[in-house]
Each structure stands twice: as structure tokens, then as C-alpha cells.
Image (cartoon, grey):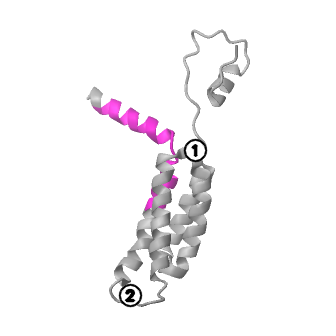
Amino acid sequence: MNMFFSKREAFKEWKARRPFWGATLTILSGLVILWIPIQLYEVAIVPGSILFSGFFLGGLVFLLGVMSYAMPKLSTVFGIITIFSAVLSIMGALGGFLVGTILGIIGGALCIAWKPELAVVETSHLDLNNDHSVENEIASGIMES
């Protein structure tokens, strides 16, 4: 039973350090946007088809969601590119019948709005003078002497 709680706590800590819901909705959006070009692949494979832009934009949105998990510090940039790609996917893949576009816009906005949580520090061994130097050290990663 203790192992279950440790895995749950480890997942909660991992989730707190990443834009979890934004990246999850972005990945889901990429899959929905990719669904239409995959279904139309055999029918609409003609030269000059915009089907390939659907593959490109759906794959890009999916990849941006995965990269938001891998590199959370760049989630703001990934969120902006996700919103643009999701809106542009209306041309190439009908935006996943607009469901993928809406999920991409919401997921991108959540990636933009995400801020990392500050770490909790044991302050019993630190001499605090009622200032916020501990929070500043944690936020910036630089220890004051």
C-alpha cells in the first residue's frame, strides 16, 4: 500500500513540474487533426492535394504536445505555435472537424498560462529574518551568501 502512495506522489511531483493538461490536450488535438488525413489518404492521394498539409500540421501539433512534456521551460513558445498550427489545420485537415482545432487552442492556451510550482523547502535549519530570501533562492536557483 505504501508503494502505491509513493508512485502516486511521484506522479504528482512529475505532473507539477510540467504543463500536464495543456500538453495532454495538445496531444489529443494532434491525434484528432491527424485522423482526417489518415482516413482520406487512399481516396485523395492526387498531385497538388492539400492532404499533406493536414499530415504536417497534425503531426506538428502532436509533436508540440510531446515536446511540452519533455521541455517544460519552452511551453510558452510551444503553446503559441500550437495555437497557430491548430487554426491553420482547418485548411489541410478540416481541423479535425473543428474539435481538434478547439482542443488545440485550449491546450496551447494552457501551455502558455502554465507556471512551475515553487519547491517546498524545509526552513527549520535556515535562519529566517522575515524576508523572502528563501523563495528568491528557490525561484532563481542562486544562493545568496
Q: CA distance from mark 1 to mark 2?
A: 39 Å
- Where does label 2 land, which residue? 45
The kind of residue on which mark 2 rests is Ile
The kind of residue on which mark 1 rests is Lys
Circle nearer the viewer, 1 or 2: 2
Q: Residue at x 58, y 39 (%)?
A: 116
Asked whether, in this view, residue 8 is left or right of residue 74, the answer is: left
- 101 or 75, which is in the foreground? 75
Mark 1 vs 2, N-terminal side: 2
**Does dot 2 land on a helix, a strand or a loop?**
loop
Q: Say if the magenta span includes residue 17.
A: yes
- Name the main secondary structure of what is drawn in magenta: helix
- 12 or 86, which is in the foreground? 86
On the question of residue 142 being in view, the answer is yes
Task: Identify the disc placed on residue 128.
Answer: none
The stretch in magenta equals 4-27
User: How many numbered discs, if any?
Assistant: 2
**Does dot 1 land on a helix, a strand or a loop?**
helix
Quadrant of res 145: top right
Task: Identify the disc placed on residue 73.
Answer: 1
Q: Residues within 10 Å of mark 1 (few under 14, many from 20)?
A: some
Quadrant of res 85: bottom right
State the image coordinates of residue 27 (x, y, percent, origin top left): 44, 60
